[in-house]
């Protein structure tokens, strides 16, 4: 009798157990192998009884939605048609193009489906999208598919941003192309009200996104950017029944984001936060303009240097609530991120410019939604190249700062700052004009000090008085270098460790900066959280800044007079109780800029 | 529903297909029912796609989680496999291989791709570190066999041994189907099965690998 191998016996018994036979029955059949069989078969039974991992419902639903949408796309692309002779040519073309793609390797066409605009396969992806369009003959279906493809461009742009890559020209061109083609079709389909609504909504969302991404567009793509934004804006104008349009040239010098009080100047010319802008039929929500209200406008600067308001959001007098939090990500989940001991919600509207991971330094613009703190925008909180850490500088505005012409350099506190289309101007506390006190956040580039944000402060002080905060880079004979700026310090002032964050109250005289007081806010390696917002509440040593609770301790250094409604800068660390413990607090305003009830 | 079925399957034949469990059809018509569902899904019928999705997402997720040990990675993989299943559905033809085995073959291939990408990027598999540094075989031996322990124990097996354990004893495939999923012969699967059980037993007994 031929002996069977142990592995065959084991396999037979495993199968028998799975068929319902008992363990003992198997062992009785193979008594010689029973000693070896028993533990393995028992283990096999135990493994089979292991409780499965139950998937999370939210993730399962999200995944199903992706499948459902993909199936809908496939349905549109696979519509059965009756072949007619007159259609043979377009079908033949489609077959030829598709065949060329397949000839290059079916795997190539498949691999291209997930490619991003920076991939060599991206062109194949766009070609396969065109092929799909060729075999869709119903106009409404074609417009629907074009809108899907346009939306795909948005997803690609977001994926690039999260990888820290600039937005290239090809994706902007493809977005514009598909959006315009969809709009052209729908212009002749007045009955397709749902599709029209979708087209307008999508165009608005895409325009809002692109306007926020001016700084993330590669230099070589600026022309395509202007064309894409103009196309989206014009789609919306046409959809609202407005016959006027904007031209790419109206965005030749980028966009400007300004917040401030509204004042009329002349017909169709208004001042927002002291900045003159044109508001006409090409501006959305222009009817919200009322003198004295606070507004935020996104304006395009044309080749003539003049500003045209594209979109406007007006509020009742008072600043737009919001806060900025910078620090290391402590925890992250699908719908919120923990930073400085506070959970901040992530919503579908959150502009996420990177992929969030624990330990990563980020800067979050926080706003309120339904009473909870949510992230409006999240970007990297890392400084740029080591040679150009950011500088925050406060001083008095000197000279003309009108944005009505092409002036792009402002003198604030004796320093020249380059104002770019990406500079955010916050003039809620008063107009940006000569004599106003302003705080500038800037980085040093080849062009000099480039302003990233300019905030008008509610402060009256000596115009030679300045304040700066930045990274200590070194010292030499009584002069410190702080974020690229030379500061004369008092004799005996002990230099901190290179890389420390320092604040300096100083006087400007003769083109030089003389420090009166120096403070070390953060040393290298400190896990410091930086918070910026309105002082919303005070209860003894417990404050709320923006939407974040903080606690002051006996070691907290406080500079300025705390009053609810003023803006505050806080540096601190998360305490054992989970609340941010303030190490250094600086009050920016001398009077409230918002009334807190 | 299929969870309870699987837990009790040691004493009952594992013949119910996931589709049968979802649709509630009788055992005698389950193969035909599944084929009918697949045929409708190939025509992109949403209800049929939903049945397939409901039946297979949890299984693929479970499979992925036992391999990867990470919820998010498992969710990503399961979602990816579902999309690939949809996009490749038109190419599925019954040739004696159960539909489930076809789906798991997609999952197995995606898993291989993931591991290759991670190795190319030099990513450290934290789950591998966890298995080797935090949960020693000795500590495993002292505890009852729970899901978490199963996952850690599996990490001490080779990839192929782990595949056989998961596919055969947890997912309930026979040797032929496991072989098709893994691209190996039935004889190789029998050998792997023996070595996998023996290795797993040594791990759980606290012996060195």
Image (spheres, rainbow, N blue to C red):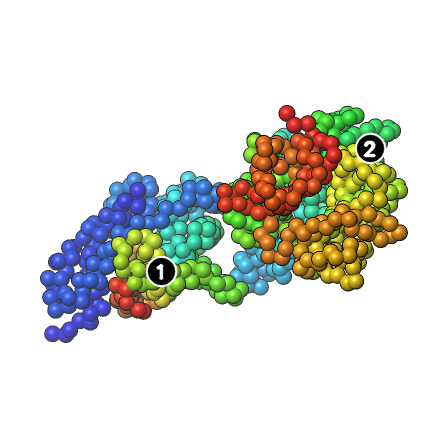
Is residue A227 in sight in this rendering? Answer: no
Residue closer to the observer: A370 or A107: A370
Residue B135: image tag:
1
- Above or below — where is A216 with respect to A280? below
Residue closer to the observer: A361 or A498: A498
Residue closer to the observer: B93 or A10: A10
Q: Position of residue A549 (x, y in %)?
A: 57, 37
Relative placement, left or right, of A315 versus A366 is right
For image coordinates 82% across by 52% down, the residue present is A513
Residue on which disc 2 sits? A271
Badge 2: residue crowd in 10 Å (few <14, some 14–19, many ≥20): many
Q: Quadrant of the N terminus of chain A?
A: bottom left
Relative placement, left or right, of B190 versus A119 is left
For image coordinates 81% across by 51% down, the residue present is A514
Q: Quadrant of residue B135?
A: bottom left
Q: Are marks 2 and 1 in contact (CB under 8 Å)?
A: no
Q: Secondary structure at mark 2?
A: strand
Badge 1: residue crowd in 10 Å (few <14, some 14–19, many ≥20): some
Is residue A477 in sight in this rendering? Answer: yes
Q: Position of residue A171 (x, y in %)?
A: 67, 51
Relative placement, left or right, of A84 versus B93 is right
Residue lying at the far bottom of the rendered structure: A2
Q: Position of residue A554 (x, y in %)?
A: 59, 42
Residue A81: image tag:
none
């Amino acid at each position: 009798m031929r002996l069977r191998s142990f592995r065959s016996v084991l396999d037979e018994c495993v199968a028998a157990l799975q068929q319902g036979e008992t363990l003992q029955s198997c062992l009785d059949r193979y008594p010689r192998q029973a000693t070896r069989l028993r533990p393995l078969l028992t283990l096999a039974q135990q493994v089979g009884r292991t409780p499965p991992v139950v998937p999370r419902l939210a993730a399962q639903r999200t995944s199903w939605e992706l499948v459902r949408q993909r199936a809908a796309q496939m349905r549109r692309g696979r519509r059965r048609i009756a072949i007619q002779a007159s259609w043979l040519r377009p079908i033949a073309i489609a077959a030829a193009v598709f065949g060329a793609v397949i000839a290059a390797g079916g795997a190539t066409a498949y691999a291209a489906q997930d490619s991003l605009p920076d991939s060599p396969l991206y062109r194949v992806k766009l070609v396969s999208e065109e092929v799909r369009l060729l075999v869709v003959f119903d106009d409404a279906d074609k417009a629907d598919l074009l809108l899907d493809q346009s939306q795909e461009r948005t997803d690609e742009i977001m994926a690039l941003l999260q990888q820290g890559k600039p937005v290239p020209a090809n994706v902007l061109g493809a977005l514009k192309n598909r959006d315009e083609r969809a709009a052209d079709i729908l212009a002749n389909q007045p009955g397709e009200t749902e599709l029209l609504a979708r087209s307008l909504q999508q165009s608005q969302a895409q325009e809002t996104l692109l306007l926020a991404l001016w700084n993330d567009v590669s230099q070589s793509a600026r022309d395509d950017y202007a064309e894409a934004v103009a196309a989206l804006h014009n789609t919306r104008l046409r959809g609202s029944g407005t016959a006027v349009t904007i031209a790419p040239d109206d965005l030749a010098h980028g966009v400007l984001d300004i917040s401030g009080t509204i004042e009329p100047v002349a017909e169709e010319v208004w001042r927002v936060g002291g900045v003159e802008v044109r508001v006409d039929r090409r501006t959305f929500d222009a009817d919200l303009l009322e003198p004295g209200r606070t507004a935020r406008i996104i304006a395009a600067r044309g080749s003539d240097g003049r500003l045209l308001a594209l979109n406007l959001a007006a509020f009742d007098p008072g600043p737009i609530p919001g806060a900025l939090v910078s620090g290391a990500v402590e925890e992250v989940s699908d719908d919120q991120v923990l930073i400085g001991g506070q959970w901040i919600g992530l919503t579908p509207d959150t502009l996420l410019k990177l992929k969030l991971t624990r330990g990563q330094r980020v800067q979050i613009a926080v706003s309120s939604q339904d009473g909870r703190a949510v992230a409006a925008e999240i970007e990297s909180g890392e400084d740029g190249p080591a040679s150009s850490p950011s500088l925050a500088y406060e001083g008095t505005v000197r000279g003309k700062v009108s944005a009505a012409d092409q002036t792009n350099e402002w003198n604030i506190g004796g320093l020249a700052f380059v104002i770019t289309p990406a500079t955010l101007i916050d003039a809620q506390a008063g107009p940006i004009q000569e004599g106003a006190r302003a705080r500038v956040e800037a980085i040093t580039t080849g062009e000099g000090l480039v302003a990233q944000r300019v905030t008008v402060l509610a402060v009256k002080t000596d115009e030679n008085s300045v304040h700066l905060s930045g990274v200590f880079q070194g010292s030499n004979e009584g002069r410190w270098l702080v974020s690229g700026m030379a500061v004369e310090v008092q004799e005996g002032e002990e230099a901190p460790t290179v890389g420390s964050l320092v604040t300096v109250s100083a006087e400007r005289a003769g083109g030089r900066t003389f420090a009166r007081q120096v403070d070390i806010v953060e040393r290298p390696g400190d896990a410091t959280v930086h918070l910026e917002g309105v002082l919303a509440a005070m209860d003894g040593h417990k404050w709320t800044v923006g939407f974040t609770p903080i606690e002051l301790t006996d070691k907290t250094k406080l500079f300025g007079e705390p009053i609810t409604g003023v803006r505050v800068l806080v540096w601190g660390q998360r305490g054992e109780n989970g609340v941010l413990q303030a190490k250094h607090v600086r009050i920016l305003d001398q009077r409230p800029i918002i009334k807190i009830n | 529903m299929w969870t309870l079925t699987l837990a009790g399957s040691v004493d009952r034949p594992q013949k119910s297909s996931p589709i049968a469990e979802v649709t509630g059809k009788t055992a005698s018509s389950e193969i035909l029912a599944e084929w009918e569902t697949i045929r409708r899904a190939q025509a992109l019928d949403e209800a049929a796609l939903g049945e397939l999705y409901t039946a297979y997402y949890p299984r693929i997720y479970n499979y992925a989680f036992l391999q990867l040990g990470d919820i998010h990675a498992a969710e990503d993989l399961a979602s990816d496999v579902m999309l690939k299943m949809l996009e490749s559905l038109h190419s599925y033809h019954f040739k004696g291989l159960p539909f489930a085995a076809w789906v798991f073959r997609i999952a197995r291939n995606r898993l291989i791709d993931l591991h290759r990408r991670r190795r190319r990027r030099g990513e450290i598999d934290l789950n591998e570190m966890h298995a080797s540094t935090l949960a020693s075989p000795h500590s495993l031996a002292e505890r009852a066999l729970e899901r978490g322990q199963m996952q850690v124990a599996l990490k001490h097996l080779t990839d192929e041994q782990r595949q056989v354990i998961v596919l055969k004893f947890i997912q309930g495939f026979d040797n032929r189907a496991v072989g098709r999923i893994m691209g190996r012969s039935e004889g190789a699967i029998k050998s792997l099965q023996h070595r996998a059980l023996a290795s797993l037993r040594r791990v759980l007994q606290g012996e060195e690998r």
